[in-house]
Amino acid sequence: MALRVGVSGSPPFVDKRADVYEGISIEVWEQIANAEKLEYILVPYPNIDSNIKAVADGKIDLAIGPISITPDRAAKNGIEFTQPYFYAEEGVLVPSQPPGLWTRIKPLFGVAALSSITFLLFTLFCVGNLIWLAERKRNPEHFPPQYIKGLGNGIWFALVTLTTVGYGDRAPLTKAGRTIAGVWMVISLVSVSTITAGLASAFTVSLSQTQLSRIMKPSDLDGELIGVVTGTTGVSLARSYGARPLPVPTLKEAIHLIKKNKVSGLISDKPILSYYMKNNPDKSLKLAPFRLSLQTYGFVVPSDSPLERLINIELLRLERSNQVQAISDRLLK
Amino acid sequence: MALRVGVSGSPPFVDKRADVYEGISIEVWEQIANAEKLEYILVPYPNIDSNIKAVADGKIDLAIGPISITPDRAAKNGIEFTQPYFYAEEGVLVPSQPPGLWTRIKPLFGVAALSSITFLLFTLFCVGNLIWLAERKRNPEHFPPQYIKGLGNGIWFALVTLTTVGYGDRAPLTKAGRTIAGVWMVISLVSVSTITAGLASAFTVSLSQTQLSRIMKPSDLDGELIGVVTGTTGVSLARSYGARPLPVPTLKEAIHLIKKNKVSGLISDKPILSYYMKNNPDKSLKLAPFRLSLQTYGFVVPSDSPLERLINIELLRLERSNQVQAISDRLLK
């Protein structure tokens, strides 16, 4: 007799298109059923909790989908979890404000930028003195012997060389002067490119940090109203971080709440959130830069059912040969 | 009656100091036993396979340690795995030569760098000659007809143009001279950036290559003699990558084989390898830059034992409250 297999959950794990089911959980189950030559029919359930209940009530032989293995579910009578087939992180989707003007130019006034500029001014001063010393006797027209005027022209010459502008209104004649200038040219080439590289990375770092949203670390969830999808582990997880969960039936509705500023964020599984963002790009939303906890997904079978060992062996084989990884890479990429 | 708990495995999971057992597996078990008020005695076993066999033979009530959940073990009669409590990657420890000072600056004297600098000096010489030939008649003030002095100023002019400094203390008047200078300016722009880019990549390549070891990607394992610790999953994993496993009783002995160049590397769990490297820093060894497969560790109980559900519920609770993560962070950091 064909196995009755309850199915529930959202893409990329369970994706119902017309009458065909696709997704990571479906493909992993299909590979197990093929390997063990099991006949089965898929029975849809509205959400994960009802799918598990049907196993406990004996209405179906097992439940498949992105079913997080949690203490409360493991404690339910009449059911058992197989070994996990997927390791997902819980994430938080939050509104993201693009960085304002000040946050964009802030690196220019950072310690790194200011210290390298001061160091540069100091070296200009030294090169100015050296050139003046080398040229003041044989080249008084470009570098007057009188110290203040001479040094002024020396520093002007060093700056004109540093930036490779090189007007040539001032240029060294003596061998010593030309050697100093030659060395200074090469140093300038290297130091100007290092400073540009330093500034470029400072901008990238500061831009990536500043996409401000109220929720930047798990403790920021405390006291916040957070959207969660009914029947998922997001509800208990939100509470465990001190947030007030607001359950809504679907992912779409929960995301709608964020955009209307009704909730400060949405807790769900990262693969499901990133899959949604991939298919519905939206600059005003982003995944918060941390994970809440590692979730494992498993299938659910009746307690002491022979199916558990059979599924476990095949599932572990699929994992060790990286086939589960191949399925999720294909569907998540 | 107190539970008989079989224990086996290496640090950081099982670490026997005098008569006290420490480690990640031990602490996770202790937290479960405390929460469920279970009395137990620890029974040591030499390796994981013998520990599992004792459960199947009914000599002990459960087995704890870094026990990878594999298809072969899941298929053994009389035993079952709990849910996993740890997710480890399998890694390969390989010999590595750390880059000395010479290897870091070698690119500067590499064929690429020396040839481009010689080529540059040669072109400076040619441009200097060309400019002198073009300008000496109509522009003797900048490029004196007398060969040595004229050529000196020609090369100075070519250098000042190459580095885009361009003082203008020497500048071409004739059409031929300006054509030569114009072409040289464009060539300089391209060649200076090519040389800088070439040097930058030569440095990166040479640094990444110097940490030479024969095994840089999984396929390099094919045909190699690889050390593994007896009774661990490293044996079957080595074979699945085409390597020839050489089992030795302990991690220390396996590492000794690498240092004596008897084996090309050692396959073991990454946490165990990085824990060993942390406590025995050794610049001549390093972890290969890839993982072989994701391993999960679980405890082993007799089939259909009530312990399975009880341990699973408590273990999932520890995980969801990040306590397992806290234990491994503390012991691995």
Image (spheres, coloured by chain):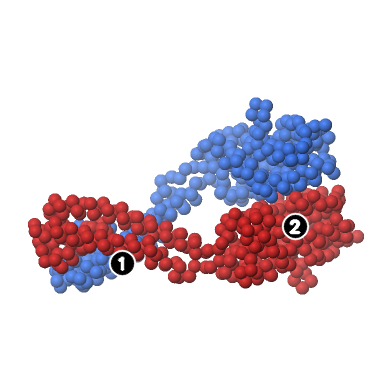
Chain colours: A blue, B red
- x 55%, y 46%: residue: A214
Q: Position of residue A1 (x, y in %)?
A: 83, 31
Q: Nearer the viewer, residue B114 or B62?
A: B114
- Residue B5 in sight here: yes
Asked whether the viewer can see residue A145, the reply is no
Where residue A133 sits in the image (x, y, percent)?
Answer: 21, 72
Q: Of helix, strand and loop, which one carries label 1? A: helix
Q: Is residue A39 left or right of residue A264?
A: right
Q: Residue furthest right?
A: B1
Residue B67's disc is 2
Q: Is A2 on the left or on the right of A171, as rendered?
A: right
Give SS at disc 2.
strand
Residue at 47% across / 43% down in the picture? A98
Q: Quadrant of the C terminus of chain A?
A: top right
Subunit bearing disc 2: B
At a point 81% along the width and 61% down the height, the residue shown is B50
Which one is closest to the eye, mark 1 or mark 2? 2
| Circle 1 residue | A123
Viewer-nearest residue: B135 or B276: B135
Tag 2: residue type? Answer: Ile
Q: B308 left or right of B191? A: right
Q: CA distance from mark 1 to mark 2?
A: 62 Å
Which label number is shown at residue B14?
none
Residue B253 image-quadrant placement: bottom right
Residue shown at 73%/45% (left/top)? A315
- Residue type at mark 1? Thr
- How many other residues sit within 10 Å of disc 1, few (<14), some (14-19) or many (≥20)? some
Q: Quadrant of residue B49?
A: bottom right
Q: Quadrant of residue A310?
A: top right
